[in-house]
Image (tube, rainbow, N blue to C red):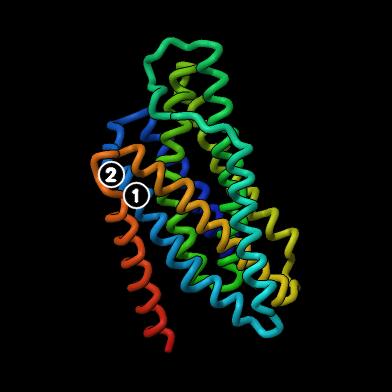
């Protein structure tokens, strides 16, 4: 199995960690969850704008017009998909509530929505790791971090709707599997012999998706979960840690 597929598998599999937290043990504090979401957003923003997009534009044969067009395509594509998806407030649905038809419907919509969000993340992880495994590792780490609260968000309402821990774990796991499917889709679509220009174009679009995900999803959700604290602290920490990591990797490989 290739390194990009392994990283995609690990990133998607982290959803199970959040799912376990949603059905057993003590739920993490909102402050910790919000910081983790901000941290993941910081990693994604730095990698997308400082590494992926410049690398794409610097590819031989890649024109700036095509590169920036694909970046904007990724941005707009994500926002369009996001507007078409259902948005439910998972923290309002906690285990112990009386199961109802509307609650079950909400749990299904929530699982579907997060699964569709995870699909392009799987593509992003695979494409980035295929081009540069170090950047792919950073994206996989960021995706894995924010998949933990997503797994928690799915498992909680499903457990409330069904009363079954195994069902909650299964549904949360399925939302993470969508990410792995996205990676496999990218693997079979792109193939091993894709031209550098096509790979650079896809990477520009993926950078746009990652920026949109950070700004539209992770940062607002962090503020919503913990309104008393500034999510910027997590964002800046994520940028700093990822920046230092990339700097050390560059020094080590020189």
Pointer 1 local density, CA inside 10 Å: few below 14, some 14–19, many at least 20:
many
Mark identifier at residue 164: none
For the C terminus, give its image quadrant.
bottom left
Identify the residue at the far bottom of this view.
254
Residue assigned mark 2:
32
* Residue found 50% across the figure and 66% down from its top: 48
Q: Which residue is pictured at 56% across the width and 53% down the height? A: 121
* Residue 1 drawn at (x, y percent): 62, 61
Q: Is residue 200 above or below residue 10?
A: below
Q: Position of residue 77 (x, y in %)?
A: 64, 52
Could you say which is closer to the camera, residue 163 or residue 85?
85
Which of these two is toward me, 10 or 77?
77
Q: How many numbered marks, from 0 up?
A: 2
Give yes or no for contact between labels 1 and 2 (Cβ–Cβ under 8 Å). yes
Q: Nearer the viewer, residue 108 or 75?
A: 75
Determine the image quadrant of residue 90: top left
> Residue 216, how many percent across, how many down?
48, 48
Report the residue marked by disc 1.
Answer: 36
Q: Secondary structure at mark 1?
A: helix
Q: Is residue 1 visible?
A: no
Residue 86 placement (x, y as % from top left): 57, 32
Alpha-carbon distance for marks 1 and 2? Answer: 6 Å
Between residue 225 and residue 118, name the one nearer to us. Answer: 225
Give me the residue at 58% from left, 39% from top.
115
Q: Is residue 182 visible?
A: yes
Q: What residue is at 63 percent from the left and 37 percent from the top? A: 84
């Amino acid at each position: 199995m290739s390194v990009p597929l392994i990283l995609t598998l690990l990133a998607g599999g982290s959803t199970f960690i959040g799912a376990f937290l949603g059905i057993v043990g003590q739920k993490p504090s909102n402050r910790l969850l919000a910081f983790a979401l901000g941290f993941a957003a910081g990693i994604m923003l730095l990698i997308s704008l400082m590494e992926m997009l410049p690398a794409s534009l610097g590819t031989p044969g890649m024109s700036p017009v095509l590169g920036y067009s694909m970046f904007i395509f990724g941005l707009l594509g994500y926002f369009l998909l996001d507007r078409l998806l259902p948005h439910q407030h998972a923290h309002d649905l906690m285990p112990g509530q009386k199961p109802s038809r509307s609650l079950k419907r909400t749990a299904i919509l929530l699982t579907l929505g997060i699964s569709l969000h995870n699909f392009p993340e799987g593509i992003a992880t695979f494409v980035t790791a295929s081009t540069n495994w170090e950047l792919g590792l950073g994206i996989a780490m960021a995706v894995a971090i924010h998949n933990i609260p997503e797994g928690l968000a799915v498992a909680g309402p499903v457990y409330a709707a069904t009363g079954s821990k195994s069902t909650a774990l299964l549904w949360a796991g399925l939302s993470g599997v969508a990410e792995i499917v996205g990676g496999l889709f990218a693997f079979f679509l792109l193939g091993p012999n894709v031209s550098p220009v096509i790979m650079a174009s896809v990477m520009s679009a993926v950078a746009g998706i990652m920026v949109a995900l950070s700004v539209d999803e992770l940062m607002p959700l962090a503020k919503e979960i913990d309104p008393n604290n500034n999510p910027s602290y997590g964002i800046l920490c994520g940028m700093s840690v990822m920046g230092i990591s990339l700097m050390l990797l560059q020094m080590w490989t020189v």
